[in-house]
Image: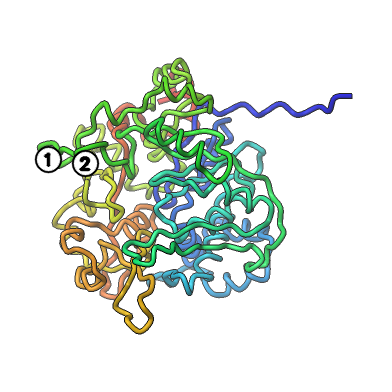
Amino acid sequence: MTESTAPAAPLPRIIQGGMGVAVSNWALARAVALSGELGIVSGTGIDNVLVRRLQDGDEGGHSRRALAAYPNQERVQAMLDQFFLEGGRQGKPYKRVPLPSLANHKLAWELSIMGAFVEVWLAREGHSNPVGVNLLTKLQMMTLPSLYGAVLAGADTVIMGAGIPREIPGALDAFAAGQPAKLRLDVKGDPQGETPVLTLDPADYGLGGVQVGRPKFYPIITSHVLANVLLKKATGSIQGFVIEGPTAGGHNAPPRGQVAYDEIGQPIYTERDICDLEEMRKLDVPFWLAGGQATPEALQEALREGAAGIQVGTLFAFCKESGFRADFRERVQEQAQEERLSVYTDPLASPTGFPFKVVQLEDTLSNPEVYAQRTRICDIGYLREAYWDDRSKAEGGKVGWRCSAEPVDQYTAKGGKLEDTVGRKCLCNALMSDAGLAQIQKNGDVEKPLLTSGDGIYALTDWKLGYTAHDVVEYLRGAAGTR
């Protein structure tokens, strides 16, 4: 008798983008999943997102409800004792998560595991539809704990861009089996050429041997060449790709070849930066198109081109359920409708060196005067780069950490180039502010926001204030009267 197998679940036609710090929050991902498409939570900065929500009193009790399902309740209670504030902060600064290093990162990692678990668990609460997580490859120091927390909570899919995530499939295999996972850390200027290896062993967090389902893995790419490289050289299996064009929000891949700039300083993209879909079809792996795809016509065209569907960010970013502060959502929509809104592809803003799309709003860091008034500080540190610090002669050097958006004198003292600090913005603090989690610094300054969006923001002109994620899904499916 032949053993029967369950039919594979149908692929989503719409993937909701994984945006910002807590913009693609659990509420948005859950709403999209309940509509029958793939909802995605952002795993970026998830340790600080969790502890700041708890310090704000955990409105609605959502985080604590999810933490009650976490497999190690002893550690949950220790974390709540440290960070939860009944009634909120009362105007005081947030307690900071210690900056992680090679030698001292266990608290930050444990909070990240819990934070990703909470976000995915809440997005999956009350239904059985798939939910995924989005991570940034550049955030190497925090990748493994965020990944593990999401896997532990039952994430169906992992999506990663901003780099080449070659080692992630193997890490997913290990975590699904309850085993330790490893990730090499890129260290700039290491004369020894010995790449340090980050290792996360679930047993170190009281979770050893917990076996869970292995999520699908969809890297974000811009070319069929990279897709082919990943299929051949990744440490495990890849189930699909998201092909992102230069009109997408957040970080963009740099243009290929010699970079030219337009009259206002934006990098110019050409046909070389457009993925060859004929070559993608030859790989026989599902793919989704992202960047400027947020119309029913684009979805149908993507399907005709052999794609499984589209990924959409901007329309979801400004819907009712997203994690953007409500006043930001409303201002952006109002200015879009008044045709007073623009998006600038800033080649300097991000410490990663990748172009970063910035919404131009007067009282945000997009305004040069507001940017100039901010006192530089690096107190979150996700975008720091690891570098070889040879100032410690007795030890022969060691791995240090620096960020081109930190205080200039500190960065240059660590061997960083002065010119690399020009125009750099602290995305860590700014994106926390976007989600209503702004830090109050020691000088009394409240961190300013910096909104990012794809070019599709101009389509908000046609949308009513307070539209929902379900409205977006129905519109993309071709339903009339949803805007």
Residue at the spot of label 2 = 344
Quarter-of-image position of residue 164: top left
Where 184 sits versus 122, above or below? below
* Identity of the residue furthest to the right in this view: 1
Q: Is residue 101 left or right of residue 129?
A: left
Q: Which residue is mark 1?
A: 264
Front residue of 158/419: it is: 419
- The front one of 104 and 291 is 104
Rendering coords of residue 4 (x, y %): 81, 27
Q: Amino acid at mark 1?
A: Ile
User: Within 10 Å of the Cα at label 1, are there few (<14), some (14-19), or many (20+) other Cα atoms?
Assistant: few
Q: Are marks 2 and 1 in contact (CB under 8 Å)?
A: yes
Q: Residue at x 49, y 56 (%)?
A: 143
Q: Quadrant of residue 272?
A: top left
What colour scheme governs how the chains and residues are painted in the rendered image of this protein? rainbow
The C terminus lies in which quarter of the figure?
A: top left
Is 42 rendered above or below residue 404? above
Above or below, 92 against 214 in this view is below
* Dot 2 amino acid type: Tyr
Q: Position of residue 212 (x, y in %)?
A: 69, 49
**Residue 207 placement (x, y as % from top left):** 68, 63
Q: Residue at x 71, y 57 (%)?
A: 210
